[in-house]
Image (cartoon, rainbow, N blue to C red):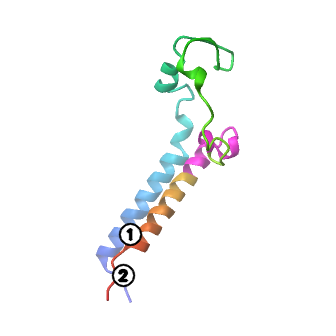
Amino acid sequence: MSVPSKDRRAMGFFVGLLLAALLIAGGLSYFASSAPDGLDTVARNGCVLTEDGEPESGTCIAQNAQDSATAGSPLADYAVGGGEGTTGLAGVLGVVACLAVGGGLFWVLRRRDS
């Protein structure tokens, strides 16, 4: 039994998309800036910061900041287990998790022939 050409092209398209997502998440993430983003920068305006970049004195929004409820999770801070240099692996795991959840929902919610 051969696979129709249309199905083969669709499968090739989805495999190509998956490979592109894995390449971007796993490879290009190492080139991302480690500098604080705009929200962090604005939240720290008006404070004197320690060497670690934490607010020491002054008045700024960041003085009231608390860790997220998920700060201890395996993929917190875009790293696996908080390890240095694991952003690419965290990105790949994120792509796989999104694919698993999306594919699972698609499979559960699909229309079925009666």
Identified at 60% across, 48% down, the residue is 90
Q: Is residue 2 left or right of residue 60?
A: left
Mark 1 Cα shell of 10 Å, populated few (<14), some (14-19), many (≥20): few
Location of the C terminus (image quadrant): bottom left
In the displayed structure, 3 sits above or below 29; it is: below
Give whichever of 37, 44 is nearer the camera.
44
Q: Is residue 80 magenta?
A: yes
Pointer 1 and pointer 2: residues touching (CB < 8 Å)? yes
Q: Quarter of the image holding residue 111?
A: bottom left
Where does residue 39 sit, x and y in percent of width and height?
47, 26
Give whichever of 21, 81 is nearer the camera.
81
Identified at 53% across, 29% down, the residue is 33
Where does residue 24 sit, x and y in percent of width and height?
48, 46
First reached walking from the N terminus: tag 1 or tag 2: 2
Q: Is residue 51 left or right of residue 104?
A: right
Q: Of helix, strand and loop, which mostly describes the magenta segment?
A: helix
What's under tag 2, amino acid-wise?
Val
- Which residue is at the far left? 6
Tell me, for residue 3, which label it has, or none.
Answer: 2
Identified at 49% across, 57% down, the residue is 98
What's under tag 1, amino acid-wise?
Met
Tell me, for residue 90, which label it has, or none.
Answer: none
Pointer 1 residue: 11
Mark 2 Cα shell of 10 Å, populated few (<14), some (14-19), many (≥20): few
Magenta range: 76-92
Element assignment for label 1: helix
Element assignment for label 2: loop
